[in-house]
Amino acid sequence: MLVGDILRKKTPRVVTVRMNETVGIAAKLMRANNISALVVKDVVRSEGNTAVGMFTERDVVRAVAEHGANAVNVKVSQLVSVQQLVSCTSSDTIEHVRHLMNRNHIRHLPVIDDYSLVSVISMRDIAAAVDEALNGAPQAAA
């Protein structure tokens, strides 16, 4: 099974946050969209569409633990490591993506095809696809 097989069943919308936005804004975006991770985009690159990292619920918790109530004013750029973005392509196998997630201790991967952000795949997406493949029918959310 390929990443693209899973993406065909997902809404193609990707929610992003810019590096210069605050943790408060990022948390509101996650809450409004009922998601637990945002793709972080670089604001200084001329393309304006360059994915540089992921901002997750764990980052919000870390910000609160380190900065207390002032965490809402901390910039996303202060919490996201941009040395090397871990990503995949739609032609990667699910086994490869699971290996990347396990090795890097992450639950969400941006999917980048031809230098363009096309989606995000999560551990939950993979688990649902594997369940469906094994059981022959989509599983209801618990």
Image (cartoon, rainbow, N blue to C red):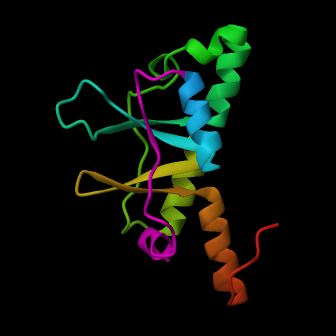
Say if residue 105 shows up in the picture. no
Q: Is residue 134 magenta?
A: no
Q: How many marks?
A: 0
Image position, residue 59 (x, y; %): 62, 28
Side of 61 where 7 appears, left or right: left
Q: Is residue 6 magenta?
A: yes
Is 7 located above or below residue 105 in the figure? below
In depth, the one of 65 and 17 nearer the eye is: 17
Image position, residue 40 (x, y; %): 43, 35
Q: Residue at x 46, y 25 (%)?
A: 81
Say if residue 75 shows up in the picture. yes
Dominant secondary-structure state across the stretch colored magenta:
loop
Magenta stretch? 1-22
Q: Residue at x 61, y 32 (%)?
A: 27
Side of 111 where 27 appears, left or right: right
Q: Residue at x 40, y 21 (%)?
A: 20
Q: Residue furthest front?
A: 32
Is 4 located above or below residue 111 in the figure? below
Side of 58 where 46 appears, left or right: left
| Image quadrant in which you'd find residue 18 | top left
Q: Residue at x 57, y 43 (%)?
A: 37
In depth, the one of 6 and 71 nearer the eye is: 71
In depth, the one of 105 and 36 nearer the eye is: 36
Image position, residue 113 (x, y; %): 29, 59
Image position, residue 21 (x, y; %): 45, 23
In depth, the one of 21 and 96 nearer the eye is: 21
Q: Quadrant of the C terminus?
A: bottom right
